[in-house]
Image (cartoon, grey):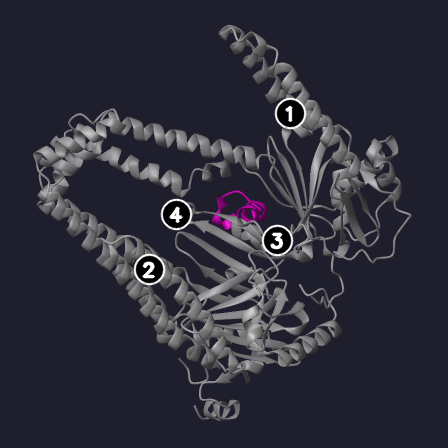
Amino acid sequence: MSSDAPRLRPPHHRVDRRAVWWWTTRSLTVTVVLTAVPVVPALIWAPPRSWFLLAAAVIGGLGLLITVVMPQWRYRVHRWEVTDTAVYTASGWIWQEWRVAPMSRIQTVDTARGPLQRAFGLSSVTVTTASAAGPIEITGLDHTVATDVAERLTETTQATPGDAT
Amino acid sequence: MTSPDGLSPQTPDHPADPEVPWQRLHPLSVWASAAVAGIFLVPSAIVGTIVLAVLGQYPWVFFPVPGSLAFLALTTYLDLLRLRATRYRVTDERMEVRSGVIAKSYRSIPRERVRSVDVAAPLYVRVFGLCSVTVGTGEKVGSGGSDQLQLIYVTAEQGEGLRRDLLHRRAPRRTGDAEGADGSGTAGAAEEEAAEEEAADEVELARLVPAWLAYAPATAATLGVGLGAIAALLGLNAQTGGVGWDWVSGRLGLPTPEQMSSFVMARLLMVVPLSLLALLVSGVVVLTLAAVETWWNYRLTREADGTVRLRRGLLTSVSLSVEGRRLNGVTLHEPFVLRSVGGADVRAVATGLSAADEKKTSAKSRLSPGMPRARARALAADLMREEASPLDVPLTAHPRSALRRRFTRAGFVTVLGTVAAAALAWAHGLANQTWWEHAIRAEQEFAPVPLATPVLETTPTWGWGVLAVLLGVAAFWYALGSYRGLGHGLHPRYLVVRQGMAARDTVALERSAVIGWRITRSPFQRWAGLADVAATTAAGSGMYAATDVGLGQGLAWADAAAPGLLEPFLVREDGGGASGAREREGA
């Protein structure tokens, strides 16, 4: 490849540090629930108990590994940036995704706070374009930051003419 | 939720326009539905009565006919209520529909958001002179969540009038529309006049050549039958004394035809070829008939204002209109079998061809039947109004590492296939006489003539090896074909991506219709320096990707395709833009 091949630079802002705890809690909850699934029959039936417990151990082990690795990894990847002309985000951990949407094509801007996000004082911003490829989401922002971003996006897009398609 | 464009369809805060009267669906539509239901219900009720009379169930004999009539009356009454409750009108700014008997609904869309108008007339509706109209908007309308407005049914004239008014950005002709429901003479005359005027400045892009229908059976389903035909040829070979196979096996030192054919063909000779031929013929007949129904009277035209109009159908006549500027591109679709016989079909990449239902989208976006490839490419160029067809743009190949990825996958499949074959060969060796007898008896339960088990029993164990080798060859051949299918390019107005082996799609998408980029990388892609670079758009499937493109190559392409959008987020190889530039000058 030639030396001037372009690359994507990471977006400027990291998400809030508390997002790590949010991802950890979420992953831990899922792990606990999934591990409990084979544990229940293990308590009821004696003969295949060891197999169920083995399954529980495997699921629990994998889940814990993910719980330890994933949030740190995500924190290093997840970034966002809003310029005067576009929204730019990076997300994912094993599979990674970068999204760019120009201001002129943004249709709606929402902020949302799930109960778990609220417990950590976090919010996410969802930016919808006319594409069926799905909205751009910036998750794990501090609540006030998210509100500011949404306001700024709404103002900028309102100032841009066109029907966003 | 904030809606920056202030055009949320839920808020009817537009200036009320008392001038334009509301229109109704045509009263005949109720009777059309009733007649169709009656055609099915009444005869079955009569049959039911006769059956019950024969069985001597006297009190019940009097139930089916009155019962079905009462049911018919009830549904007709409900339909009548629905008809009475439904009103629509087209004002200068909006199309509005009121409907609902119990739950009232009001849906309103700005006319500038109308992307496509689909007028369909199934045979049983056509005899009443009616048609249904579906208006595609490319976005959700109201809380119902559908992105379409439907009118079932209006008169053919009303349908045609709606089609024209909604897509031509001129004020509705009020005299005609106001009386349209009664189908009065003046309205009809106006329609005819307009139709004549329209026909004059209509450009025909394509018209059905009946020979094209021969491409209809060229699908993977018929290929399966075709594979069977090859097996039948082998049977024929054995029947004629196996001259051909004698020659091949003599050269290669394979088992003699006696060894091979004595077990397989002894009594299957007649059954297998005949049933395969029957399958092939019936497959071809069915597919051709379906194509005749779908594509009869096929005409693709462009009207004076740029609207592209598709007309087709024998029993259900369909007319689909897509506003010119909503047609953001074209897909040249070449499924493997159609491709190998030199055919292709053309699909639209258009906003408002309901993106919600994938199946429907592909049905509606099909702008042509299978046709010769050169014709399809010419049609695509015509549709895009380009002298130099975007499909003729030379495409850049993707890096070798994309081929390596595909070979790795093929290798994986081969290894799995070999392991499975070895396991089966081992199990095959273990199975003894009694086991086979049980298996044959079991197969006899399902099929009159057991074919599979005797063939299996007499196949030597190395047959599994042959199978594994064939699988491996096919996997690597597929990998190579799939790599060769990859490509991306740029036309002054369009970006072009191509991919696919089983079905190769070459997509030309208007560069001005790109509304963002999505770059994804799996761990393997990061390792190999590859990425999927996808342009997001409001049209068609919403996203068109250059798959497994080199990261730098793909980003440079995306940057060139939509200048300025990606630029602020790119850095040249070694960090700073300035140092990169210096390095370039030095090199």
In the depicted view, which residue is nearer to us: B142 or A120? A120
Mark 4 and mark 3 on one chain = yes
| Comparing labels 2 and 4, the label whose residue is closer to the camera | 2
Q: CA distance from mark 1 to mark 2?
A: 58 Å
Mark 2 and mark 4 on one chain = no
Going from the N terminus, do you reach mark 4 or mark 3 first?
4
Residue B383 is tagged as: 3
Going from the N terminus, do you reach mark 1 or mark 3 first?
1
Residue A39 is tagged as: 2
| Comparing labels 4 and 1, the label whose residue is closer to the camera | 1
Q: Residue at x 91, y 47 (%)?
A: B19
Q: In which chain is the residue bearing label 4?
A: B
**Mark 4 Cα within 10 Å, few/some/many (few <14, many 20+)?**
few
Residue type pointed to by label 2: Val
In the depicted view, which residue is nearer to us: A43 or B84? A43
Which element type, helix, strand or loop, lies under badge 2?
helix
Residue B340 is tagged as: 4
